[in-house]
Structure formats: structure tokens, C-alpha cells
Amino acid sequence: MASPPFYPVNDFGPAMKGLVIGGVGILHVFLAQFAIGGGMLLLYFERLAQRGTLPDGRKFVDGFFKVLVLVSFVMGALTGVAIWFTTIQVGARTIGLMIDEFHWLWATEWVWFAVEVVAGYAFYRCGDALSPRARLRLLTMYAFASWMSLFWINGILSWQLTPGQWTAGASVWVGFFNPSFWPSLLFRTCVAATLGALAACIVINTMTFDADARGRRAALIRRAARLALPIAAMPILAMWYFAVLPADSRGWLLGGSMPMTMFVGLAAGASVLIGGYVVVGLVLKRLYINGATATLLLALAFGATAAGEFVREGARKPYTVRGTLYSTSITPAEVIDLRARGATTDDPYPLREPAQFVTAQLQRGAKVERALCDACHTMRGANALVELTRTWTDDQLRLNLAKLQRTKGFMPPFAGNAEDVEALVQLLRWEIADRPATWPESHDPATLAQITTWLDQAGVR
């Protein structure tokens, strides 16, 4: 069996890789969904303005589009590049698999994104000079293209968590239209519409009018609030989404993992607060919302988005592509080979400043940690291995590493042999002891035999 590929690794210091890609990804997702909802809102307001039912609709469209271009096009483009830059450092093999499998569908998404950008800039530059019919067509093109971009990327992202029969050799379309495709797509569409409406309320409060400013702003706000009404369907869509998740992932979200359960609660609670204010306050009671309150609601929506993306990413554990690729960028089949040959036998990349590790065994442990741990952990920063293992005894540490997938169900099997386990144990004990200048090596045959027994008991699944 061929060894898994190794890639150059960037060290983010105390910020674990998951936090780096998560931070960039959350911001990008938020901006992208805002761009989609903003397109829907602009088309809606333009139609109302042309029908004469919203006299200030055109003024809002021309003003809001500048905000949309600045925020979603400029910042969205920058974070889009950033997300590719970080993902190829954090999970190069995962990105490679996704591109290999969905390259034509991803290309289709890029085409729709290009249409969105061209239509958006065309309206930004020429919208004032266009006829009403041309304006409407260009905004329709922009809104539809932005939603189609979501359509295609949603299938690829949801495939990571619920590939369905694709793992049994079914076609790419089975993987694309996977079990969570429709609930995820509809849920994100509702989120996008809500974000567009909340951002509109902020912009409306910055508009100036010659007379009856508050009344004219209130008329615009009431119309914008209607676009956020799909938020009422989000609880049903969320239950649908949870129903199609794998049973173990659903269990972690609903109590099996307290951090995951807390983020589910944060996302749900923030969404309920926003939805209640929109439905009861803005639509039923027709309340006026000022800029400060609208900004607070949008910030709350950002928090809900962040929590939701954390939940989506965490629910895949221990995989990056469920059933196919572990979070360590190792396939389940390759674990068998690495158990026999060692986790870093074919790793061609040297350690940074290897002399800091005072024995050959500690150097081996550092390479094992880099290959099997640092996708989700740091040594002394976020999710620090030193703090997680500080109170464990040596044998407890050996046992827990050897039976890693039994120790924590959302962690992959240890993809190495007994010598790798012992090298990692010694590295952690050395780090916990504050890196003394000398450290004894540990190669006791009885200890290695016991670790081998534990590895065999744990298995490779």
C-alpha cells in the first residue's frame, strides 16, 4: 500500500489550524450570505419602486448597492482568497479530493460567481443611466447568479458531512445531492435573506430625506422586514438537517459533546431572538428600528453564523470527508499500513530547529505530533496537548493514545506503531516538565509490547 502524501506545514503558533481556517471561513460565509440576501433585497425594492408602491425604493437601491459592492465584493473577494490560502495549508489533501471529485461542478460555481461580479459591477457603474427594464434585468441576473453560486457550493460542502451512497461508489451527482443538500440550501437561503434585511435596516437609518424622514425610513424598514420572514421556517429546516445527520454526529450536537451542544444552543438562541424581533416587532407590531438596534441584531446574526459554522465543521469529526478522509488527512485504509510502518517513516520534511529536541526519540515524537495531532491541537496554545494531558500518568497517556478513537469518539485512530506512541508520550512528558536540557529515552520492550496490545485491541476503525 502506498504511503499517504505529506505536505509542507505552516505553524500558526498558539492558534491552532482549525481556529485560523475557522475564523477566515466564518467571515467569508457571513459576507457571502449577506451578498446573496442583499441581491434579493435589491431586486425586491427595485420592483416595488418601478411599480410605484415604494417611492424611495430607487434611492435605497442606488445607495445600498455601494455598500454591497464595498462589503461583499471587496471584503468577500479578499476573504475568499484567504480561505483558499489557509485551507491548502491546513487541509491540502481534503481540498485536493474535493477538487478532483467536483472540479466541473466547482467550475460551474465559479462561472456563476463571475456572472454575479460582472452584473454587480455593471449595475454599480451604469445603473443610473439604464432604463427601468434594463435595471431590473441586471439586478435579476445579479440576484439569481449569487444564489446559484450558493447552490453549487452548498452541494460540495454538505457532501463533506453526509456523502451518502457516494462512499459506496455512486456517481458524483449522488454525492452532490446528498442527504443534507436540501435542508442546508434552504436554511442558508433563509439566513441570507435575513442578513440582507438587517443590513438594509442599518443603511436605511443613514439615509437623509427633505421631509418626514422618520416616516419614509419606517416605510422602507417595513418592506425590508418582509424579506426576513423566512427566518420563521428556520426551526423546521434545522430539525430536518439534524434528522439527516449521522447518528453519532447528531448525538455529539445534542449532548454528547458539551462544547458542540453549547454552540448549537448559542446559534438557536440568537436565531430565536432575531426571529422574534423581526416577526413580532417589525412585521406584526410595525415597530421602528433605529441604526443601533439594527447593528446589534446584525452582530447577533454574525454570532449565530459563527456558532452554526462551528457546529457544521465539528459534526464531521473525526473526518474531513465522512467515511473517506480523517481529520489527519489519512484515509481509513492507510491507518493499517501506518500501524505497521510508522507514522512518519516517509515524511520528507525536517523539523523546524530540530536541535531543540534533545534526543532522537523526542524528534520522532515531534514529527508524530505534527503528522497526527496538530490539525486540531497545539502544544501550548489553543486546545493544548500539554494542558489536556498534564494530569495523566505515563501508562494512562500510553493507553489513551493507543486507543485514541475509544478515548474520544470524535478523534481518528492512532495511525502509527508502538514506537510512535512512546515517542509522543515522551515528547509530552518532556514538554510538561518545561523542556529540560536532558531527557532519558524510553525503549522498554515490555512497555512497547503493552502499547502494541492496546493498539491491536483498539483496531483501526
Image: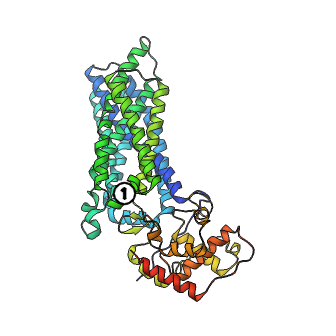
Is any atom of residue 50 visible in this view?
yes
**With respect to residue 455, does 246 lie above or below?**
above
Quadrant, the N terminus: bottom left
**With respect to residue 91, does 285 lie above or below?**
above
Residue 53: x and y, percent? 28, 20
Residue 206: x and y, percent? 48, 23
The secondary element bearing badge 1 is classed as: helix
Residue underneath mark 1? 251
**With respect to residue 309, does 204 lie above or below?**
above
In the picture, measured across the screen, residue 10 lies left or right of residue 277, that is right
Foreground: 265 or 220?
265
Q: What is the quadrant of residue 436 in the picture? A: bottom right
Foreground: 41 or 356?
356
Residue drawn 35% across the image and 59% down it: 161
In the picture, measured across the screen, residue 11 lies left or right of residue 225, that is right
Residue drawn 61% across the image and 85% down it: 443
Residue 70: x and y, percent? 47, 37
Residue drawn 36% across the image and 66% down it: 100
Foreground: 22 or 115?
22
